[in-house]
Amino acid sequence: MSELTRSEKSLNQLFAGMWQNYLALNPDAQSIHQLFGGHSEVVNDHIALRTFNLPQVNIAKLAAPLLANGYVEGGDYVFERKKLVAKHFYHPTNDKLPKVFISELLVEQFSAELQDTIKQLINQITPQMVAESDFLYSGKPWQLSFATYQKLLAESEYAAWVAAFGYRPNHFTVSINHLSQYNCIDEVNQLLLDNGFKLNAVNGLVKGTALQGLQQSSTLANKVDVVFTDFTVKIPSCFYEFALRHKIDGQLFNGFIADSADKIFESTDVKLA
C-alpha cells in the first residue's frame, strides 16, 4: 500500500467518524441533504473545530493528524471581540477533501476564574488521549456542572460551548458550488426557510459578498440534552453552514473572511437558538 493510499484511508476514516459524531447532535443535516436531492453527492466545503490556546490542545495539536496526512496551512484569522484566533488547513492536491477551520480561545485574556476553570478541564486530558485517531470527535473528556457552564457562558459563549461539548465538529458546510440544482445562496436560504429551518440572521442571512470571494449562511444550532453533573439541560449544539465561493482574479477563493466567520460563530449563541 502506498503512502498516499494510507493517508487517504486515514483521512477518510477521520472525516467519516467526525460526520457520524456530528449527525448524532445535528440530524437536521441529513434532512437537509434530502432537500438537495438526497441521491446526489453533497460536497463538504469545510469542517470547523473549536479549542483553547493551551499547549495540550492548541491549534497545532488538533491539526497534527491533518498535517501528517498531506494537509498544509492556509490563512490566519483574528477575532478580537471574541478573543479568538484561527487557522485553516487544506489538501493541496485533492480539492474534494474539506478544508478544516480550527479556532482557539485566547484563555489568558479572560478572568482568572475562567482561566483556572479551563485549565482544570484541560489538565484532565492526557497526551495519549490527544494522540488517539478519534480525538477530534471524542467529545467531552471531563465532568462539568451546569453552574460552571453558566459561569463560563457569562464571559464567553465559545468557552462554554467547548466545555459542554468537548472535541467534535462544531459544524460542517455544504459547498453550494457543487450542488447540481442550486447555484445561488439566496435560493438555498429560501429552500431552508420554506422547509422550517431557522437561519442565523446576524448581520443578514448572507455573510460576505461575491466581491470578497465568499458568501456564507448557516442554520441556528439545534438544542440537545447535555448531561451535566448536577442537571441535564438543553443547550445549542451544532449547526450546518452553506458556502458559495467566487473567483477573484480568475481563481476560486479558497480562504475565509474573518468578519463573516465572526457572525457565523453566533450560530451557537444561546440568545439566538
Image (cartoon, grey):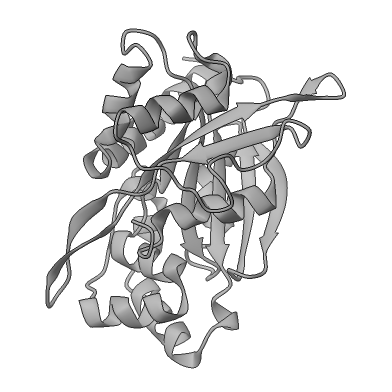
Q: Is residue 234 above or below residue 198?
A: below
- Residue 212 point in image, percent of width and height: 76, 37
- Residue 220 point in image, percent of width and height: 38, 47
Q: 204 left or right of 135? A: right
Q: Is residue 60 above or below residue 229?
A: above
Residue situated furthest right in the rendering: 249
- Residue 3 point in image, percent of width and height: 54, 22
Q: 195 left or right of 74? A: left
**Residue displayed at 12% across by 78% down:** 230
Q: Nearer the viewer, residue 28 or 149?
A: 28
**Residue displayed at 28% across by 41% down:** 26
Residue 78 seen in the current view: yes
**Residue displayed at 22% across by 40% down:** 24
Residue 97 seen in the current view: no
- Residue 232 point in image, percent of width and height: 12, 67
Tell me the quarter of the image containing the C terminus.
bottom left
Residue situated furthest bottom in the rendering: 112
Q: Is residue 196 above or below residue 152?
A: above
